[in-house]
Image: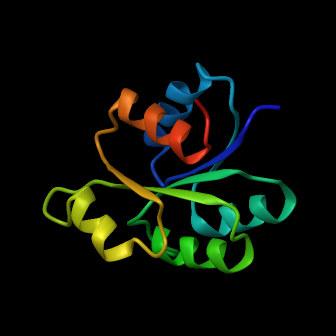
Amino acid sequence: MSAKILIVDDTDIIRALIKEILDSSDYDISEASNGQEAIEILAKNDIDLVITDIFMPEMSGIELAIKIKSNYPHIKILGITAGGNQVTSDEALNMFSDHFESILSKPIDQEELLDNVKYLLNID
């Protein structure tokens, strides 16, 4: 059975890029363009891993992560941040380690993403 991953990002291109990278590994992938959509998908599906943008309008990835940890504590969460002037991935992980198991910086590095997903899903 393949792992079920939910990608949450308000930018279509980012979601498509992450999906394309993960498609090569035969995961069952769902997508949401915002936190509210993600909550609706989580309520109807058994998801193993959520990959979410941290800084999104309406509901941030942090707010989403808090809701996931509260309602679905078994789900692993990988945060993604644009970094830049806002915050680096290491700084974000230090600030938000209660909510995310790992945080990556954009632009997404394919190998780093795949390694993190395998690690979080406990796949050799």
Q: Specify the farthest residue to the left.
A: 85
The total number of labels drawn is 0
Residue in the picture at 82% in, 66% down: 43
Residue in the picture at 28% in, 54% down: 82
Q: Specify the farthest residue to the front.
A: 124
The C terminus appears in which quarter of the rendering? top right
- Residue 120 at x, y = what percent? 55, 47
Q: Colour scheme used in the picture?
A: rainbow
Q: Looking at the image, is 12 positioned above or below residue 52?
A: above
Residue in the picture at 53% in, 26% down: 20
Q: Specify the farthest residue to the top.
A: 24
Q: Looking at the image, is 82 positioned above or below residue 108?
A: below
Left or right of 57, for residue 42: right
- Residue 103 at x, y = what percent? 38, 55
Left or right of 63, for residue 86: left
Say which of 90 and 85 sits in front: 90
Instruction: Using the rendered view, name the quadrant where residue 70 is placed.
Output: bottom right
The N terminus appears in which quarter of the rendering? top right
Q: Specify the farthest residue to the right.
A: 44
Instruction: Using the rendered view, name the quadrant where residue 46 is placed.
Output: bottom right
- Residue 2 at x, y = what percent? 76, 32
Left or right of 68, for residue 51: left
Residue in the picture at 31% in, 76% down: 95
- Residue 65 at x, y = what percent? 55, 71
